Amino acid sequence: MQKKVFQLLVDNTSGVLSRISGLFSRRGYNIESITAGVTADPRFTRITIVASGDDIILEQIEKQLDKLVDVRDIKELCPECSVYRELALIKVKVSAEQRQSIIATADIFRAKVIDFATNSLIIELTGTQDKIAAFLNLLDGYEILELARTGIAGLSRGIDNVTFLEY
């Protein structure tokens, strides 16, 4: 099994995300993560999907997505020529003795403490999935009360691969 990151530009209409996720569920494809947001042009939404499967399945996913009426453009974001980021919010239970150690670890990862309570901290961390996984591994001895992750958002590097859409 391997992963591919697909970037879609779609019409910003109601139900578009439902139609795309429905395609995955009908065919039994796996979505590792999916993020969506309006682009600089409010007529379009950028959707980033991380899918897993073998080469045949991943090729089928791309072909099936390309057939959807709402999809204006689809491309694979390969790791060598793209930038990926994910946001994680992590609520950690802490005692007064543990607090400084967790804050120091967060500082090393350029994470921010965004909420400070007497018995917990909420840490905001942005980076690659590997960076977030490494940070979570360092918190192994602490009790993580809650964890929220956005999934990957990504863009291709440079201007050569930018898609301009016209109606």
Image (cartoon, rainbow, N blue to C red):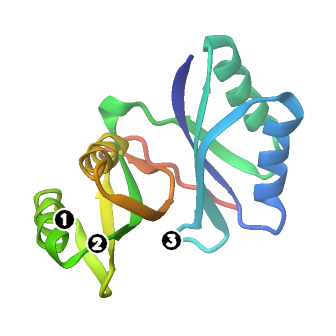
Report the residue at 43% width, 49% height from top: 154
Name the element at disc 1. Answer: helix
Q: Earlier in the sequence, mark 1 or mark 2?
A: 2
Horizontal and vertical percent position of residue 63: 73, 27
Name the element at disc 3. Answer: loop
Q: Earlier in the sequence, mark 1 or mark 3?
A: 3
Dividing the picture into quadrants, the one containing residue 15 is bottom right
Task: Please state which of the two labelled residues, at mark 1 or mark 2, is closer to the viewer.
Answer: 2
Q: Which mark is residue 94?
A: 2
**Would you name the residue on which mark 3 appears?**
40
Label 2 neighbour load within 10 Å: few <14, some 14-19, many 20+:
some
Q: Amino acid at mark 3?
A: Ala
Task: Please state which of the two labelled residues, at mark 1 or mark 3, is closer to the viewer.
Answer: 1
41 vs 94, nearest the viewer: 94
Horizontal and vertical percent position of residue 140: 31, 48
Left or right: 138 with respect to 122? left
Q: CA distance from mark 1 to mark 3?
A: 37 Å
Above or below, 54 against 135 in this view is above
Report the residue at 83% width, 38% height from top: 25
Above or below, 69 against 105 in this view is above
Q: Amino acid at mark 2?
A: Val
Q: CA distance from mark 1 to mark 2?
A: 8 Å
**Would you name the residue on which mark 1 appears?**
102
Left or right: 116 with respect to 41? left
34 vs 102, nearest the viewer: 102
Q: CA distance from mark 2 to mark 3?
A: 41 Å
Dividing the picture into quadrants, the one containing residue 130 is top left
Label 3 neighbour load within 10 Å: few <14, some 14-19, many 20+:
few
Left or right: 71 with respect to 86? right
Label 1 neighbour load within 10 Å: few <14, some 14-19, many 20+:
some
Q: Amino acid at mark 1?
A: Ile
Report the residue at 82% width, 56% height from top: 18
